[in-house]
Amino acid sequence: MCAARSYEEEVRLAEESIAPDERMSPTTVDIKPRAGGGSGGEGKDDSMRTHAAQIELDLQRTFPDHDDFRIAGKGTEGGKGGSGTALGPLRRILLALAHAHPEVGYTQGMNFVAGWCLLVLNNEEDSAYWLMAGAYTRPLFSLT
């Protein structure tokens, strides 16, 4: 990770590593694998496509009963929909983290931690990203 990069720069770099037809809108929840297994190259771009696909699957699972994370028309009870306003920021945070920390990338469950950060920080996207990045780089304990 390059400490001098801003959150906006990480988002831009993460999105550039994914083909334009694979980039998602704030309410898109489906991503299809690239036909033919990718662009022919291997490395960080392929890894980011894999992370992006998993992030898309997990976005719709993040706090499905909370209005900020529920997509209109995709309610869990009685067809209730939500605003889904936190899905775009959550996607960008997770993609930027996967790009900035390739040694970790994206793992299932990070969506809930990042979503919680967004909620407690009143949807301040930059602050939620830096809180998550701090947990990556300065953990309070080590499992090893």
Image: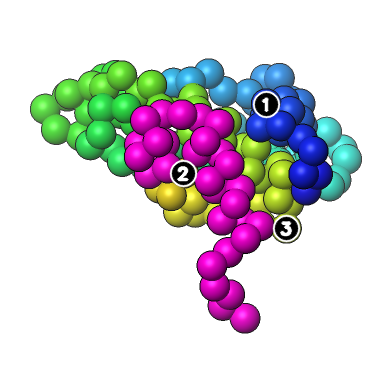
Contact between labelled residues 3 and 2, with CB atoms less than 8 Å apart: no
Res 8 label: 1
Q: Position of residue 51 (x, y in %)?
A: 63, 44
Is residue 117 part of the magenta span, yes or no? yes
Q: Amino acid at mark 3?
A: Glu
Q: Position of residue 126 (x, y in %)?
A: 55, 31
Q: Which residue is mark 3?
A: 103
Res 114 label: 2
Label 2 secondary element: helix
Label 1 secondary element: helix
Which of the two labelled residues, at mark 3 and mark 1, occupies the earlier sequence position? 1
Q: In this orientation, which residue lies closer to the viewer: 30 or 6?
A: 6
Which of the two labelled residues, at mark 2 and mark 1, occupies the earlier sequence position? 1
Mark closer to the observer (2, 3): 2
Mark 3 to mark 1 CA distance (whole Å):
20 Å
Mark 2 to mark 1 CA distance (whole Å):
17 Å
Q: Position of residue 30 (x, y in %)?
A: 49, 29
User: Which span of residues is magenta-colored?
Assistant: 115-144
Q: Residue at x 54, y 73 (%)?
A: 141
Question: Circle 1: is it few (<14), some (14-19), or many (20+) Cα within 10 Å?
Answer: few
Q: Amino acid at mark 2?
A: Ala
Q: Amino acid at mark 1?
A: Glu
Mark closer to the observer (3, 1): 1
Mark 2 to mark 3 CA distance (whole Å):
18 Å
Question: Image quadrant for the C terminus?
Answer: bottom right
Res 123 label: none
Is residue 101 part of the magenta span, yes or no? no
